[in-house]
Amino acid sequence: MILEVEFFDEILEEFLGLDNRLYENDLWKSYSIIKLMRTSDEFTDNKIVEEGLKIIVSLYKFKECGALLDFYEKESYSIHELAEPEKTLLGSILMAEFI
């Protein structure tokens, strides 16, 4: 009987070992879902399958362009695009923090 922790540890290790190629991420997702479905009978809790699918899809999206995404960077924009009052405010915050 495979433990849930062992299963998720295996798929996470496989995820971290991927190269930065988009097709490998797709293959990892498909393989992980197949592996989850095959081992689902061995889990003591049926909610593990649902949670496992959520984890696999989340990891897949985290690396959907082939490289790990930084969601803070993805949602931010250049300081040069800020309006002048925002630049002044940001400058004063940074000066207060670091000087």
Image: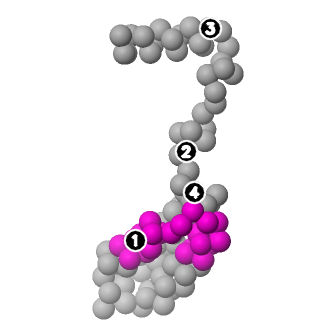
Instruction: Report x, y in % for residue 97.
Output: 37, 15
- Badge 2 amino acid: Phe
Say what secondary structure mark 4 lies in.
loop
Q: Nearer the viewer, mark 1 or mark 3?
A: 1
Q: Check the image and report above or below for 46 versus 55.
A: below
> What's the distance in space between the residues labelled 1 and 3, CA to CA?
46 Å
Task: Say which amino acid is labelled 1.
Answer: Glu
The residue lying at 53 percent from left, 39 percent from top is 72
Residue 71's label in the rendered image is: 2
- Tell me the residue that label 3 is attached to: 85
Q: Earlier in the sequence, mark 1 or mark 2?
A: 1
- In the image, taking residue 73 as reference, residue 51 lies left or right, namely left
Instruction: Quote the CA–CA distance across marks 4 and 2.
Output: 12 Å
Q: Residues within 10 Å of mark 3 (few under 14, many from 20)?
A: few
Q: Which residues are the magenta region?
A: 8-29
For the stretch drawn in magenta, the main secondary structure is: helix
Q: CA distance from mark 3 to mark 2?
A: 26 Å
Q: In which quadrant of the rendered view does residue 6 lie?
A: bottom left
Q: How far apart are labels 4 and 3 at the CA level?
A: 35 Å
Q: Amino acid at mark 3?
A: Pro
How packed is label 4: few (under 14 Cα within 10 Å), some, or many (20 or more)? some
> Callout 1: few (<14), some (14-19), or many (20+) C-alpha neighbours within 10 Å?
few
Look at the image and tell me whether residue 27 can be seen.
yes
Residue type at numbered disc 4? Ala
Query: Badge 1 is on which residue?
Result: 13
Along the line of sight, which residue is nearer the eye, 84 or 50?
84
Image coords of residue 24 (percent x, y) = 59, 72
Q: Which dot marks residue 90?
A: none
Residue wearing tag 4: 67
Q: Nearer the viewer, mark 4 or mark 3?
A: 4
Q: Is residue 62 left or right of residue 6?
A: right
**Quarter placement of the C terminus:** top left
